[in-house]
Structure formats: structure tokens, C-alpha cells
Amino acid sequence: MPKNKLAKFAEMENLENVFQPKHAEIFRTDHPLKGKWGKQVFHNNHPIVLEIGCGKGEYTVGLGKLYPEKNFIGIDIKGARMWHGAKAALEEHISNAIFLRIYAEMLDSVFAPNEISEIWITFPDPQMAKARKRLTGSRFLSLYKKFLKPNGLIHLKTDSPFLFAYTSALIQNNRLPCYIQTDNLYESEIEDKILGIKTFYELQWLSRGKQIKYIRFSLSENPLLEPDIELEKDDYHSEARYMNPNRPATL
Ligand SMILES: C[S@@+](CC[C@H](N)C(=O)[O-])C[C@H]1O[C@@H](n2cnc3c(N)ncnc32)[C@H](O)[C@@H]1O
């Protein structure tokens, strides 16, 4: 029987692969595990990969299965979603996939310089009205720079033409190294088993006939500037209302 949110929250407190720091442990202060995730949590020095805005954590769990020689951390603020990934990882004995429930804004309180090798951003809300909240905007990319290794890859998978155009423009404007960029991944020639993993939101967008877009890039040492262009807004609605028009806008 599906569990309700409260039951999931209660269970999360005791899941060994879920970390839920208290606000006071990360607000303007460093978490005790900062710089120590490899040694103290995974008990190895393998590369650590983040999935930011992981939702149910399909990439965190899927990549964990595919790459036992790497460690994966799914980041989200919504615990009831994260519960699905955490349970799946435990049930399938995937010990290199864990979950961290925090706002992405706090990432530099939990990760030290060069602690992270790679970042996945899967189907984020394009935040068309607020560039500051875009997980691929200059504010967040500057934050990622504080803990991502030089040349560490950032992967964006999105259904949103707006976010794809915005991120592409930002990459171009800042002359960032870009390795792959396609506005129709599944019609492209790109073959990569990693890209075949499909998240909860991706499946919803695919069932509505949306084309999936993908960009693989890295950062540079220079300060990041926002692209100075007008972008056409797309028809992305608040996620909850889009998925179920009868539901209230907040989750
Ligand atoms: C549209 S959902 C996509 C979820 C999942 N990646 C998928 O593809 O199914 C976006 C997720 O990003 C999370 N998110 C957005 N902004 C965030 C932030 N600043 N900090 C932490 N999580 C955030 C939301 O809670 C939500 O679960």
C-alpha cells in the first residue's frame, strides 16, 4: 500500500542512507561531514557525483547500479520524493547511492572544494520568472564552482525549450567548454547507456510528446555572467498543477 507523506518522513529518520541536516548545522556554518563524505560515509575515495533536484532519485540509484566504482548523492528538499530512491537503494543493496535532504542553496556548507567530481541536474523547474532560482543559472553555477573539481562535468537533462535555450546561451556567453548539446536526445546519434535512465518527470514529459534535451558542459575559472538575451517562454506550468490539474499548486 502506498505510504502517506507523514509515514515516509517518519521512516526517513531511520534510513541509514538518508542525511537530513538540521538548519542550524548548515546555515552559515560547515556541516561536520564537509570534506569527509568519502572517508566517513562511503568508506572509500571514489569520485562523488551529485544529482541536484533528484526528486525520486532515479539517476542517483540508476547510476549507482551502473558505476559501483563511483559514489552518488541525490540532493532534494522534498523528503517524500526522496524516500522512493532511498528505499530502492536499500532494497537493491546499492551502497554507493545515498540521499541528502537540503536546499541546493546550502551545498557549499556540506561539500568542500574539489570534493565533487560531476553534477547531474535532471528536469529542473525552468524558473522562467526568476533567473536566481534556475539550477543552471549563474548564481547556482558559481556556487557549484566552490566544490566541483576543475573540468568536472555538469549534465542537464530537460524537456524545457526555455531552459535549454537559456543554458546554451549562458554557456556560449561565458565561453564554457561544452561537449554535447542536443535538443532532441532520443532522435540524436548519441548513444550512452547513462542517458537512457528515465526519471519520473521525464516519463511524464515523454508521454506528453515532449522532446528531451541534453547538455554536457563544464565551468571555467572566470566569473559567470547572465546571458543578455530575450527568450521565448514555453508552456511549462507549475509542476503539481501540470501533473494533476485538480491538485492545489503547492506540494
Ligand atoms: C521538476 S522536479 C524533478 C525531479 C526529478 N529530477 C525528476 O526528473 O523526476 C524538480 C525537483 O527539484 C527540487 N528542487 C528545486 N529547487 C531546489 C532547491 N533549490 N534545493 C533543493 N531541491 C530543489 C524540487 O524539490 C523537485 O523535487
Image (cartoon, rainbow, N blue to C red):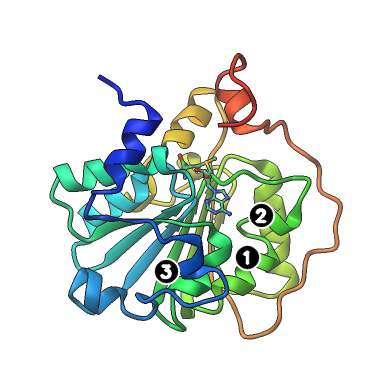
Numbered circle sitting on residue 97: none
Q: Is residue 244 above or below residue 43?
A: above
Mark 1 and ligand 1: say if the CB distance to the nearest ligand atom is below 8 Å. Answer: no
Task: Return the residue at label 1.
Answer: 140
Which quadrant is home to the C terminus?
A: top right
Q: Are marks 2 and 1 in contact (CB under 8 Å)?
A: yes
Height in image: 168 above or below 86? below
Q: Which residue is mark 2?
A: 134
Residue positioned 75% across, 70% down in the render:
173
- Element carrying mark 2: loop
Q: Position of residue 16 (x, y in %)?
A: 21, 55
> In screen coordinates, is 156 left or right of 195?
right
Residue type for callout 1:
Phe
Q: Position of 61 compared to 103: left or right?
A: left
| Mark 3 residue type | Glu
Find the distance from the CA under tag 2 to the CA under tag 1: 7 Å
Question: Could you tell me how far apart the alpha carbons at marks 2 and 3 are, in whole angstroms?
Answer: 18 Å
**Disc 2 residue type?**
Arg
Marked residue nearer the N-terminal end (3 or 1): 3
**Which residue is found at the position 68% from the left and 67% from the top?**
139
**Does the residue tagged 2 have its C-beta within 8 Å of any atom of ligand 1?**
no
Mark 2 or mark 1: whose residue is earlier in sequence: 2
Nearer mark to the viewer, of 2 and 3: 2
> Is mark 2 in CB contact (under 8 Å) with mark 3?
no
Q: Quadrant of the N terminus?
A: top left
What residue is drawn where x is 56% and y is 36%?
211
Circle 3 sits on which residue? 118
Q: CA distance from mark 3 to mark 1?
A: 15 Å
Position of residue 127 measured from the top left corner of the image (x, y, whole percent): 70, 46
Q: Earlier in the sequence, mark 2 or mark 3?
A: 3
